Amino acid sequence: MEPVQDYARAVVQMVVFVLYAVWIAPMQSLLYVVFGVGGGGLPWLNGYRTHVGLFGDLIVRLVRYPTVSLGVPHDSPLLRSLLWLAAAFGNGVAARVAFCVARDSFADAHASVRTGFWLASQSASLAFVSESGSSPSGSEPSANKPVPNHRDQLAMLYVHGGGYVNGSPEISFLHSAHLCAAFDRIAKDHLSLIIFHPQYPLCPEFSNDDALQTCLDAYRFMLLKGFKRICLAGDSAGGHMALNLLAVLSTQHADLIQPVSAILYCPWVDPFLTVLPAQFGASDVSFHHDIITVVGSRYMASKFAPTITKEMRIAPLNWHDSVLESLTPNILIVYGGADVLRAGIDAFVDKLQRIADQKKTKQIIVKKRYPYMPHGFNRLFLDSFGVSRKTALESVDVSARFLFDSLSS
């Protein structure tokens, strides 16, 4: 595959994305309002999320990616204002109107205040967030330290994607809302799911080690809240972060209560795409229809990789067997058969399974590969219709069932 050809495809893809945001999506929103088609809930709200939310995300991409390429600092007042307006105008406003979301803050290792968002299917599940949250000076949660126990709740730390240079917690709210509702249906009145979305620092303003430290501090924060059963999850780069967090917790913080499970959606296990699908090129479905390109993945990887120390492993696909063996015993990997990352994910899952079989570990590796689905389908297609939406909802139900079953394994 010629690099020029892939660059050209990326440009065409962006043009199509713009046309969708300014023309097709408003028509889709109108259908939601007039005919009530699409997802459940208020029709206008579904249309709002589809159109305005997508448009807000598009503005963020149009602002961040070119300025990252040009080396323009994102802390300038103009760019900060544009990015804030895009996030507020897009998924942020719609999600907070539609879902049970509570904003919270926690202190990181440098005593800086970080922001996060709790999300649940019922507002009653968020009552506890008004309690003291940030870690007191010098305090450290541990497996031996008594803390309040939320017996009726399973907590999830969800890390959003975006190649570490883009994205915000709000882009994952719709998926999290569906997941909470699906889990609560399965668990009935015995248990509920609550999800915490940390707002971690992005590259190139901050190093990727800062992002890892923020997610680790968010995990400690959840333990201090009293949660003893926590699942780690993330999509794309968020899946990459979830894996790194699992590895750091198991190898460097064994004194902490360990996660009970992990869910990785289209995980970025091979950021530089050293492994591509066989005969990848113009005849491959992901070459034309996936939302991520080879050039795009390698470009974003080139921005975060130089900021990583040896503690943060760049490519989980290349991790040593001993590190993979130490991960949480229950891992679900969800991805699409038309994802440009699928070859690397296939190899990663096979490696995990081989280790579990050879070492006779207690690891349970569950692989769900959906044919013809592109990168991020589980999140992006929830506001779609037809087979694509049905598949996205099925992946949510599979995730909820996995979460519930992993508690008793």
Image (cartoon, helix red, strand yellow):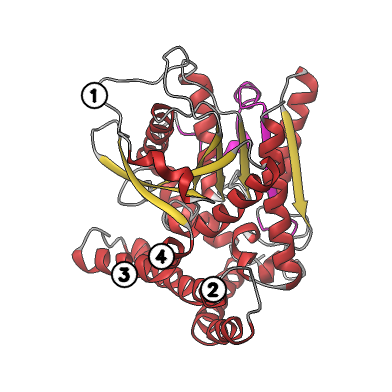
Q: Is residue 22 left or right of residue 290?
A: left
Residue pictured at 57% horizontal, 76% vertical? 43
Residue 158 drawn at (x, y percent): 51, 44
Part of the protein shown in magenta: 312-340
**How many angstroms separate mark 3 from mark 1 (CA)?**
34 Å
Residue 365 drawn at (x, y percent): 73, 34
- Amino acid on which disc 2 is placed: Thr
Q: Which residue in the protein does label 2 denote?
A: 50
Residue 304 drawn at (x, y percent): 42, 47
**How many angstroms separate mark 1 from mark 2 (CA)?**
43 Å
Q: Which residue in the protein does label 4 denote?
A: 65
Q: Secondary structure at mark 2?
A: helix
- Mark 4 or mark 2, earlier in chain: 2
Q: Which mark is residue 85?
A: 3
- Which part of the image, by quadrant, shows the C terminus? top right
- Amino acid on which disc 3 is placed: Leu
Asked if the stretch drawn in magenta spans residue 324, the answer is yes
- Whether 38 is drawn above or below 302: the answer is below
Q: Which mark is residue 203?
A: none
Asked if the stretch drawn in magenta spans residue 202, the answer is no
